[in-house]
Amino acid sequence: MAVRAVRGAVQLERDEAGHMQEQVAALLTAVLERNGLTADDLISIWFTATPDLHSDFPAAAARGLGIVDVPLICAQELDIAGAMPRVVRILAHIETERSRGDVHHVYLGAAAALRKDIAQ
């Protein structure tokens, strides 16, 4: 079994805790589904949020999905002029039989513009 990393991002419409939990949960669910994963395949998840998001911790959405025994950490994304606002990004470390080329990174909605080269 190999250790791989999978990326993803979602842009929020507004900075509200319920909206953040809903959108981050949708992102995590899509990452799991598109890669044929379960919570048991997760090693850890890094979450970053742009500096304009203050309403909640993105990791709270993972806990709400029942991902309770996986190490999670939240950090603030760099404050770069002109960067896309209200974005939550993830970097999940997983155990999988998939090759690097078969890992599906997930960029939802407007966040697909962040990585047109790998967004599905």
Image (spheres, rainbow, N blue to C red):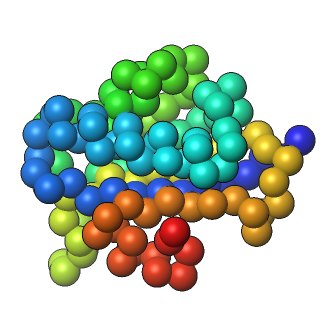
Where is residue 49? Give x, y as percent.
Answer: 29, 51
Which part of the image, by quadrant, shows the N terminus? Answer: top right
Across the whole image, how many numbered discs are drawn on residues? Answer: 0
Q: Does residue 7 lie above or below 116 as drawn? A: above
Where is residue 79? Give x, y as percent.
Answer: 23, 66
Q: What's the residue at 46%, 80% (across, down)?
A: 116
Seen from the viewer's position, the closer of residues 93 and 39 is 39
Seen from the viewer's position, the closer of residues 108 and 43 is 108
Left or right: where 2 falls relative to 30: right
Q: Does residue 4 lie above or below 112 as drawn? A: above
Res 42 → quadrant: top right
Q: What's the residue at 19%, 80% (across, down)?
A: 82
From this viewpoint, is residue 51 visible?
no
From this viewpoint, is residue 12 visible?
yes
Where is residue 37? Give x, y as percent.
Answer: 67, 39
Where is residue 9? Give x, y as percent.
Answer: 40, 58
Left or right: where 61 falls relative to 52: right
Q: What's the residue at 21%, 54% (across, down)?
A: 12
Q: What's the residue at 76%, 68% (across, down)?
A: 101
Left or right: where 38 falls relative to 99: left
